[in-house]
Image (tube, helix red, strand yellow):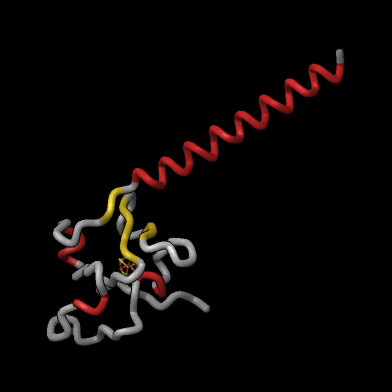
């Protein structure tokens, strides 16, 4: 009897963990891609492609500056998109850029 109860408990824990993992993945997938026309994105000169930043307007921008190398970007590894603390609930392009770029600490 004890072993059966323990097995049921372990199955419930495993099922509960799966639900948590699945809901976390769904929450991340649901985050919308940041639109370059979003008012805050426009204000900060966000471009989804760092190579297309207006060099005349943003003279301090350099080619190696991308969201993926920014302190505020929390995307993982080689993911093409990821969260940025300046744009809660949105995903920015790893290859993007905005004028708030801050070099990620080494
Ligand atoms: S703050 Fe950094 S991560 Fe966020 S959009 Fe600007 S450059 Fe990209």
Return the x and y of residue 23 as percentages of the image width and height: 47, 37
Residue at the outermost right position: 2
**What is the quadrant of residue 3 in the picture?**
top right
Front in this rendered view, residue 87 or 78: 78
Looking at the image, residue 63 lies above or below residue 78: below
Horizontal side, residue 92 vs residue 4: left or right:
left
Q: Is residue 37 above or below residue 52?
A: above
Q: Determine the residue positioned at 20% across, 87% down.
A: 59
* Residue for point 26% across, 83% down: 61
Give the mark count: 0
Q: Where is residue 64 in the image (x, y as percent from the top left)?
A: 35, 83
Q: Residue furthest top?
A: 1
> Which image quadrant is residue 38 in?
bottom left
Residue at image location 34% in from the left, 47% down from the top: 31
- 88 or 96, which lies in front? 96
Quadrant showing the N terminus:
top right
Ligand 1 lies in quarter: bottom left
In the displayed structure image, the side of residue 23 where residue 5 appears, left or right: right
Please state if 14 lies on the left or on the right of 31 as rendered: right
Q: Is residue 82 left or right of residue 2?
A: left
Q: Quadrant of residue 55?
A: bottom left
Residue 103, position in %: x, y? Answer: 41, 78
Q: Position of residue 68 (x, y in %)?
A: 40, 70
Query: What residue do we see at 43% from left, 61% from top?
Result: 75
> Is 75 located above or below residue 3 in the figure?
below
Q: In this view of the protein, which residue sits in the foreground, 78 or 55?
A: 78
């Amino acid at each position: 009897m004890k072993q059966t109860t323990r097995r049921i408990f372990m199955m419930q824990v495993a099922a509960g963990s799966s639900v948590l993992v699945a809901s976390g993945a769904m929450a991340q997938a649901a985050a919308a891609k940041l639109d370059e026309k979003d008012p805050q994105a426009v204000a900060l000169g966000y471009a989804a492609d760092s190579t297309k930043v207006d060099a005349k307007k943003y003279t301090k921008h350099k080619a190696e500056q991308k969201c993926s190398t920014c302190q505020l970007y929390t995307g993982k590894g080689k993911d093409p998109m990821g969260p940025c603390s300046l744009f809660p609930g949105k995903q920015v392009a790893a290859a993007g850029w905005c004028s708030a770029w801050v070099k990620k600490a080494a």
